[in-house]
Amino acid sequence: MSLAWLWYIIVGVLIIGYAVLDGFDLGIGVLSPFLAKDEGERSILRAAIGPVWDGNEVWLITAGGALFAAFPFAYAFAFSGFYLAIMLVLFGLILRAVSLEFRHRDQRWGKLWDACFFVGSLLPALLLGCAVGNLIRGVPMSSGLGMAPGAGPDYAGTFWGLLNPFSLLCGVVGLSMFVLQGAAWATLKTEGALHERAARVRSRAQVAFIVLVVATTVAAIFVERDQVHANVTSVIGWIMVVLLVAGVAWARRAMTKGRDLSVFLGSSLAVVGLLGLWGNGNWPFLVRERGVSGPLSGIQATQYHSSHLTLVVMLIIAVIGMPLVIAYTAYVYRLFKGKVRADQSEY
């Protein structure tokens, strides 16, 4: 096992952790205007994520730090080529944080902060999926194979080029995934009429998610066959397919049984399977080059990584740090488990 391969997995685990955990935060933000019928219910939804949302974002920050440490050329390429898109994601996350902190202290501008909560959740939910779509499809680069040591490629496209039909389809898939996570979490944390509405949305969101995943898979056959081929011909790819299908089936069965925790866990397992398929199909590339004739080209994890010493030192830090983060996260979720009630809903 090479260190580059191991760090590729670590970055992937961090991204999956963010999608599972902050995914339900974003989903509740998108659903809030439609689920909540009055201020009391809006307050309950905010309180459902209040103790954990900022901790969930740490997974994204850590993934960015790991990418910078292990694969600096990919980090530089992403933050230069996708600069505007990344700034919009960060703007959305900042807007969401501000709206959550200000909402219960500034009642005069309550409707404005509610709108900011919705927009600040919608932007990242949609754009993160678009980013994945472009990484699957490939992006134009200034150079391909044979780049000189110590030099990395540059993005040769435009921001509008990132908003192609396939990436937008992936963006909608990502949005449906986060909405499903949000609805599953809302049913887990609420009671009464709000719980019933969230359960109905959860069922519909899962159907939409399944349809969109199938549509994206078909589209990927025409857009990037190598990704599909890599998953179909590898054991890891089939394992991820099993996780995706098992997660969907588990969540669906749990819905009929009224087991809200199992629904959330099944939905989370489906997220792991879906993102695992992307990661497995993309290996060894971090970013693919589009429009290249001949062998595949792009920024490869096996070629454009940090020095061996850097990877070793960062691995030691990860081995020590990640269990602490997981333990802290588990403690927080255990501490704040259970339903949110009206008399406990202020955040």
Image (spheres, rainbow, N blue to C red):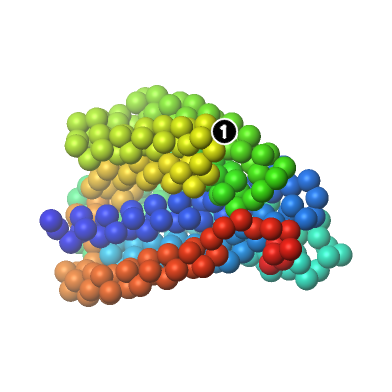
Coordinates of residue 279 in the picture (x, y in percent): 31, 45
Tell whether 37 sits left or right of 301.
right
Q: Residue furthest front?
A: 257
Coordinates of residue 288 in the picture (x, y in percent): 32, 44
Q: Quadrant of residue 94?
A: bottom right
Coordinates of residue 43 in the picture (x, y in percent): 73, 58
Name the residue tied to disc 1. 203
Q: Residue at x 65, y 58 (%)?
A: 340
Q: Nearer the viewer, residue 239 or 296?
A: 239
Secondary structure under badge 1?
helix
Q: Residue at x 64, y 50 (%)?
A: 190
Q: Residue furthest right?
A: 108
Q: Amino acid at mark 1?
A: Ser
Which of the image's four quarters has the N terminus?
A: bottom left
| Neighbourhood count class around disc 1 (C-alpha, 10 Å): few under 14, some 14–19, many 20 upward | some
Q: Residue at x 60, y 59 (%)?
A: 49
In the displayed structure, would residue 220 be above or below residue 73?
A: above
